[in-house]
Amino acid sequence: MQMKISTLSPIDGSVYVERDLASGPMIEEALVKAEQARKSWRATPLAERIAVLEKALAYFVNHADEIGQELTYQMGRPIRYTPFEIKGGFQERAKYMMDIAPRALADIELEDSGVFQRFIRKDPIGTVLVLAPWNYPYLTSVNVIWPALLAGNTVLLKHAEQTPLCAERYAKAFAAAGLPEGVFQYLHLSHEQVAQVIADRRISYVAFTGSVNGGKAIQKAVGNRFITAGLELGGKDPAYVREDANLEHAIENLVDGAFFNSGQSCCGVERIYVHEAHFDAFVEGAVELTKTYILDNPLLPETTLGPMVRPSAAAFALRQIEQAIKKGAKALVDPRFFVHHQPDTPYMAPQILIHVDHKMDIMRTESFAPVVGIMPVKSDAEAVRLMNDSPYGLTASIWTQNVEEAIGLGDQLETGTCFLNRCDYLDPALAWTGVKHSGKGYTLSSLGFAALTQSKSFHLRLPQT
């Protein structure tokens, strides 16, 4: 039986942190505390909840450099980038959800007839279990934790075994902010323990970010209960570079979208379709830009491409590449160009493949790695058909000067988000959602509060004088 978790740093394979798993009594204590805290936190005025969360956000921003270093050790992203997970997207999303909370959580008032008063109130749903991943451990978790607490819920957080210190940082931030005891708690749990917690009647909602197989397990776990789960799962996100695209801009942003965080992003660009008129120029520019990356120890300030999370993740992607080459694909980047590329380690060189097709896993199955396949297309119709030829549907990007035609193409795409001339970004004002195997439910925007609240209708016959 698993008794503890050990986080092996991708940097050198050493044990960076070890933690004991929660015991049965610890789990029960957390559930009891959450239940006890629910009434008082729900009754706390929204302005006071916002004030506490503003203090917690200040803690994160003030400790961003320390948190960034912890993150680099835990999951391998270069230290030149990790502090900006807090200073950038985390801060932006937390602030936006606090800004819109008063109107998003306000009663929905209907017209007063003079005889009846009617309105819909948005009550907190209860205790929210957040199951967060390692690849963007703060960006993914803030999407649920902040609005859940704003709405008056209590929260239990279970972070990935690769990033346990992130859960502990949340606890430190909320303690510094004066959040009442029991409103937020974290637990280090095994998969079996997670299933047990989900089965507990005191859990009202589950928010999971992770793999498709993980999502299926969560869906099965909630199946015997009348609760729902929000699932943010995988992606094989496509891009289409039209004939009228700004080629230089598209190359710069799509290469970054494919290789940032070593390609370990659910909404990273994993396949690119380029109009045949620009295919050769696009590929040449992409290869040249890729060769400017510096693959090395992520603690070095000059490193722009760190190791993947573990050797098995790199090995999976390398097998995809090998299979594609056997089926006729051509790899354009010699791994030996990157002196720190090391087989059987997480240090994987970025790769670009051409002569690819949809019979290859590299164009159909999520890679979650610094590799991208590029195909030429003759028309918009061909591009749309290929972009939709996937079990996933998280984001898709179109690169063109024609906004109206881009919207028309976007209407045809089976995707949760359609970008124009950008990619790999979450705007907190927009609903973050996926279709097909990319998941279900919404986070961020005003819609992000919907799953975290329970609507209650008030139908009041007014006293007549």
Image (spheres, grey):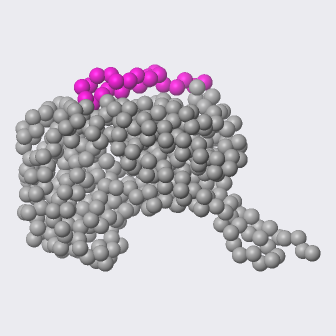
Q: Does residue 45 appear left or right of residue 148 in this picture?
A: right
Where is 40 relative to 189, above or below? below
Q: Quadrant of the C terminus?
A: bottom right
Please state if 332 lies on the left or on the right of 95 as rendered: left
Q: Which residue is located at x 71 percent, y 63 percent?
A: 457
Report x, y in % for residue 116: 79, 73
Q: Is residue 241 visible?
A: yes
Q: Is residue 359 visible?
A: no
The answer to whether residue 202 is left or right of residue 81 is right
Residue that protrudes farthest toward the right in the picture: 465
Q: Which residue shows up at 20% across the image and 62% down it?
A: 250
Quadrant of the image occupied by residue 54: top right
Q: Where is residue 427 shown, x and y percent of the image? A: 40, 58
What are the residue bounds of the magenta stretch?
3-25
Q: Is residue 14 magenta?
A: yes
Q: Residue at x 82, y 76 (%)?
A: 115
Asked which quadrant contains residue 363, the reply is bottom left
Q: Position of residue 21 (x, y in %)?
A: 48, 25
Q: Is residue 404 left or right of residue 18?
A: left
Q: Position of residue 327 (x, y in %)?
A: 10, 52
Q: Is residue 111 magenta-colored? A: no
Q: Along the line of sight, which residue is nearer the eye, 261 or 249?
A: 249
Q: Quadrant of the N terminus?
A: top left
